[in-house]
Amino acid sequence: MAMIVELGLQGLQMLLVVLIAPLVLGITRKVKARLLRRIGPPVLQPYRDIWKLMHKEAVLAHNASWIYRVAPYFIFAATWVAAALVPTYATALLFSWSADLIALVALLGTARFALALAGMDVGTAFGGIGSSREVMIASLAEPAMILIVFTVALVAGTTQLSAIATTFITASVGLRVSLGLALFALICVGIAENARIPIDNPATHLELTMVHEAMVLEYSGRHLAVIEAAAALKLVLYFSLVACLFVPFGMATGEKTVGALALGMGSYLAKIFVLAVLLPIGETSVAKMRVFRYPIFLGGAFAAAALAVFLLFVSRGF
Amino acid sequence: MGSLAFDIAHLLAGTMLVLSFVLLYQDRVTAVLNVFALQAIVLALSVAWQSVAQASPHLVVTAAVALVVKGFIVPAALHRIVRKLDIHREIEQVIGGGVTMLAGLALVALSILLVQPVGEVNIITREDLAFALAVVLLGLLMMITRRNAVTQIVGFMSLENGLVLAATGAKGMPLVVEFSVAFSVLIAFIVFGVFVFRIRERFDTVDVSALDSFRGERSDRI
Amino acid sequence: MSVPIELLLLLLVPAVAIVLLALVTNYRLGAALNVLACALTFGAGVGLLFVPRMRSDILIVDDFNIFFVVLTTFIGFTTSIFSATYIAHELETGRLTPLFLRFYHAMYQAMMLAMNVALLANNTGLIWVGVEVATLSTVMMVGIYRTPEAIEAAWKYFILGSVGIALAFFGTILIYLAAQEVLGEGLPAMAWDRLVQNAARFDPRMMSLGFVFLLVGYGTKVGLAPFHAWLPDAHAEGPTPISAVLSGLLLNVALYALLRFKMVLAANPASLNVGAIMVVLGLISLFFAAFMLYRRRDIKRLFAYSSIEHMGVAAFAFGMGGPLANFAGLLHMTMHSLTKSAIFFAVGHIAQVKGTQRIAEIGGLSVTHPVLAVGFSFGVLAIAGLPPFGIFASEFILISSTFARQPVLAVLLVVGLLVAFGALILRLQDIVFGDPKGPKDPVEASYVPLFLHLALVLVAGLWLPAAVVGWFRAVAVLLG
């Protein structure tokens, strides 16, 4: 009986992230439109877009290989697994033992690899541009991400997400500069990984400025639907990560009573909503950067994360 | 009180270090001046906190001096100089922004390593010193890697911020030192101010690389 | 205990003079006041010799610093005489204006005040203040001609000096922290005599770390390679009296500060072996400067590198340690101050009559200005280390005592000195002999300081008064 409940809770988390991903995307677009004094598409529009795309014919270039066809599903699968592992409304779920931060980074890296390959597969110029830029951004963002993982792991004593969340909720971690710096770094990395302004404009139609969009330029039909869903899922993943690592309050730890679970679910949805509103506010207040400035931006994130790690060593020694 | 005092001091000193990095990151003169003003304000807060934690009321004077002189007067005066002399707003860099950041990180790691032996004596002292030394070295890095005379001034003042942080962290260092630090701030500013004017009127620029052509060691002048 | 009146005068006279000189508009009156103030200060310094040694928590008069006080005030005095007679020509050629001269004289006294404070301080922080203010005032004076080269030199001097001073301050804090554990907070933990007495109980690692910072910081002020980059430009572009003062006084005061800290560290055997580091730095400076001497084409720059070389020799001497080497080092510091300032006086005369500092444009001095040629030649021979001048005596003592302990180092030392010797003699020939070049204007500034210094150096090379020898010996033992 307990096993079924556990299975159910874990499955609920897996479904939850998939289902709310398009909604989060919709909220982001709506808020951005409102800030730009437009009315903007309805909040549920992404669901309709995915539905529409699913029913359209997928057109493939005649020289597309099996990689091109398989990549969207692979990307979606990897991203979904990663997103499903991050604790959302409760800790210590059934598969939480596998929710290791480093494994998460590896999963995202694999998904990105597949996407880059798919972008280059058909041999178009824009696909190549997108892939090379994506990998360049990754080469700058991944070290920062790893250092963020180190910071958090050094403070909590483990890399397992569920245990980290539990430690942060229960123990008194205190006001630490390192965690503030890690949060800042995570936000920068998240922006870069999710192709938001100031790294990449998700709504652009100018191919030369694209990064993520350029890689998926050739996709259509169900493939495109899957890729769009994966992108939305990645955004939710990063939101969940920020919520779980830095504001884990409200999550159901210990006893999984209905009240605790409801509180956890409510607080999770509230956090996601807040982040979904804050993101477009941030996006509209800065301009997109030129590509040669990406290293400086991500270098800043790396420096913040490295500083966070160093500052931890100041007190504990080497 | 002990642990909270330590936490807040830690927080303020860490913020100063982060601001030093932010100083390195900026590429416009006005942004640099604003961040420096912010760092001076954080320094004043840190010194004021130390005066409470160490129960030495005379440190409040140092805090006030840091706040007024370095937090308001110096940035305001430098803003005026930048406007009046119409100084080129972008800062030329000797090495790229990314490399500068990496060098800054290396210096932070170095300063933490260097003050390791102090830790045998007193953990709290070691942390204060590590932060202060890092701020000093980052100020030095800024002086070296920026070609603009105004930013070299700011780098030097940031270096002095680190020194004040170190001096106030050292418990009970007598008044002499505090006044000397404040005094040197004033003198340094006067000297710097005079030089900025002289450089500007001699060279029509405050880009100190223009001074390079007058380096005495060039082959035609040795 | 009360503060002796001479001590007060040493500090008050320059302080008052700063104010007066900033206000006086007539430059001749200003120059005369400058000389008077320096004379009074010198008198106070000599008077301090006969006053019993005293200490307070802020000031100290002990065997170590009393001689330096006398030396500093003496050279300050003779340089002020030289300066007073030098500036008339500078005004004529338009390199200086009366307004700048007020500033110049005020800064001169500020520098004297700061150096006195540094020498008489019994507080590690106060000595830092003194060295910093002295640096700042000389920075202002180096840039006073306002040519592009002068501004560049002053800017470079300021930047490097500030960096050095900041690192030195950090080292001061570390030493305080080491002392604070044992001596408690406040002034006693910063007093030299207390520090030396109790150093054996301090944490050696903290002291060693602090000394490294102090070595880099104050070492920049001393002009040890590789921290010397400011020195040649600052000497070449500033007015000649300032070059004399920089070489003759400021380098000494910085080395004095380093030696004070070395004494503290020497009292704790577990701390860093300071001597070895100083020997290495000294040799590096010596060789670097000796080789650089060959390519110098500007006469002031030439002697600036010579200063680096001799400071390297002094650092080597103190690094070797032991009564003989320390004695040699102290004697060397004194002789170098006197000789180098004499040389800069001569160089000032030359620059004024020939209107240039480039060696290629100066020649045949023995034909056009025989007296000056004699003075200059003696100065160069003295600084190159020829007997019977004082520098030969100090170098000889150093080489022989080093040879007895570390023959290899002694050989290196001799090689370096010979290399420098060669360069100096070559340049001497270029300048003094050969066909006359350039204008033949008569010398306007006073010869007295030049020949007075040379006479002192000559006498000291032949015979040192027993009191001075006794003093050197006592301090050599203190230095450990």
Image: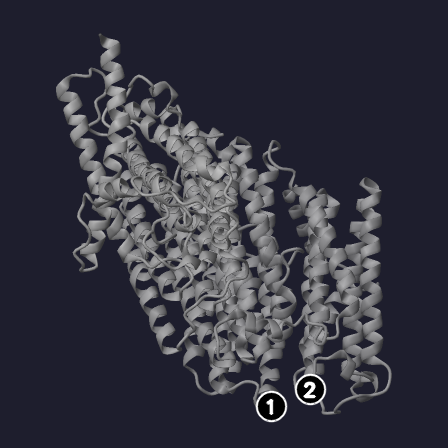
Residue B7 can be seen in this image: yes
Q: Is residue A201 left or right of residue A127?
A: left
Instruction: Report the residue at 61% width, 75% height from top.
Output: B214
Taking the view exactly as shown, the residue that stands out farthest to the left is: A259
Compared to residue C98, the image places residue A220 above or below, namely: above
Q: CA distance from mark 1 to mark 2?
A: 9 Å
Residue linked to disc 2: C355
Q: Give the position of the N terminus of chain A as an image quadrant.
A: top left
Q: Quadrant of residue C238?
A: bottom right
Q: Secondary structure at mark 2?
A: loop
For label 1, count other residues whose C-alpha is less than 10 Å away and answer few (under 14), some (14-19) or many (20+).
few
Q: Quadrant of residue C220?
A: bottom right
Give me the chain letter of mark 2: C
Residue C183 can be seen in this image: no
The amino acid sitting under disc 1 is Thr
- Say the numbered circle drawn on residue C93: 1
Compared to residue B36, the image places residue C434 above or below, namely: below
Percent x, y for residue B107?
51, 46
Q: Pick the residue in front: C105 or C448.
A: C105
Q: Pick the residue in front: C70 or B40.
A: B40
Give me the chain letter of mark 1: C
The amino acid sitting under disc 2 is Gly
Instruction: Report the residue at 82% width, 64% height from top.
Output: C421
Q: Is residue B55 left or right of residue C384?
A: left
Contact? badges 1 and 2 (CB < 8 Å):
yes
Q: Secondary structure at mark 1?
A: helix
- Say the numbered circle drawn on residue A190: none
Q: Quadrant of residue B124?
A: top left
Report the number of numbered marks: 2
- Mark positioned earlier in the residue sequence (1 or 2): 1
Percent x, y for residue C121?
49, 53
